[in-house]
Image (tube, rainbow, N blue to C red):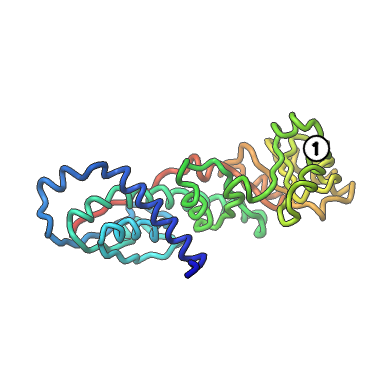
Amino acid sequence: MIESQKEIVESRLSLKILEFLREDLGSGDITTNSIIDAERHVKAKIICNEKAVISGVEEAILAFNLLKCSAQGLIMEGDSVEEDTIVIKVSGKARSILKAERTSLNILGRMSGVATETNKMVKEARRANQKIRVAATRKTQPGFRIFDKKAVKSGGGDPHRLRLDDAVLIKDNHLKITSSVTKAVQLARKNVSFTKKIEVEASSAEDALEAAEAGADIVLLDNMSPQEVSKVIKILKERQVRNGIFLEVSGGIRLENVKAYSETGVDAISLGWITHSAKNIDFDLEII
């Protein structure tokens, strides 16, 4: 029987979590195995120790399930919680729970950190523009991208490209080789399926205008101040190409300036900060 898309995704997720468990376990938990009876059953709870947006519950539960434990999520993906909130209850063999403990807490801490930081950015940006999208970049932890991107969505953000085959994004180094924005767009349009969006990174008003007039679907204004972004938008409007272009801005964006970028009228703000610099959220597992 052909597997459904959901089954394929779940299978890949299980393999990822299993890889994380194997990384931590090595040849076995010598501490637990030496002092805890193999048949001892216990119950435990996972507590979030600070205010956060929760992400990674499904993945943490899967870590326990793979070691034959039973786990129940008490909080939904994307929910906001206060400190000292129980998010998961677990029961099973003590050895198995202790073996899955650190892996599950690492996943929850990382994903909830990304979701929480994303949510802060989204709320701040939408103070100026309710329709603005706050997107991630590919600045993720190697091997952890699917989880980082899911956490971004849980925090209210947009995952952007997951991989290089999702869309065309012509960046500065591409342009140094092809030498022309127009030529690069034309080549991409010719050689890539019509189903794929074509985006061009522009570091100047001239490049942005050329990209728009060459037929790019998206123009990414890179490393510009909010004032410079506003000037580019004005030029695009004067040349009557603004309405046909999705405008994204990126580079040097933080919580303290994201509202200023949102006020310019761009359609999306992308930033690596929410994945590469998000602070882990503190979780504990306590045996009951």
Q: Report which residue position mark 1 lands on.
A: 181
Q: Residue at x 81, y 34 (%)?
A: 180
Q: Position of residue 279 (x, y in %)?
A: 43, 43
- For the residue carrying disc 1, how many other residues have a C-alpha within 10 Å: few (<14), some (14-19), or many (20+)? many
User: Left or right of 212: which side holds 147?
Assistant: left
Give the vertical position of 131 relative to 24 (above or below). Answer: below
Q: Residue at x 79, y 41 (%)?
A: 208
Give the image quarter of residue 254.
top right
Q: Is residue 265 visible?
A: no
Q: Position of residue 145 (x, y in %)?
A: 49, 47
Q: Is residue 77 visible?
A: yes
User: Left or right of 219: which side holds 138?
Assistant: left
Q: Nearer the viewer, residue 79 or 124?
A: 79
Q: Residue at x 33, y 61 (%)?
A: 87
Give the vertical position of 277 relative to 81 (above or below). Answer: above
Give the image quarter of residue 91.
bottom left
Farthest residue in the right direction?
Answer: 239
Q: Position of residue 186 (x, y in %)?
A: 82, 43
Name the residue type under label 1: Val
Give the vertical position of 279 relative to 134 (above or below). Answer: above
Q: Quadrant where the C terminus lies?
A: bottom left
Farthest residue in the bottom direction?
Answer: 1
Give the number of callouts.
1
| SS assignment at label 1 | helix
Give the vertical position of 72 relative to 170 (above or below). Answer: below
User: Left or right of 97: which side holds 253?
Assistant: right
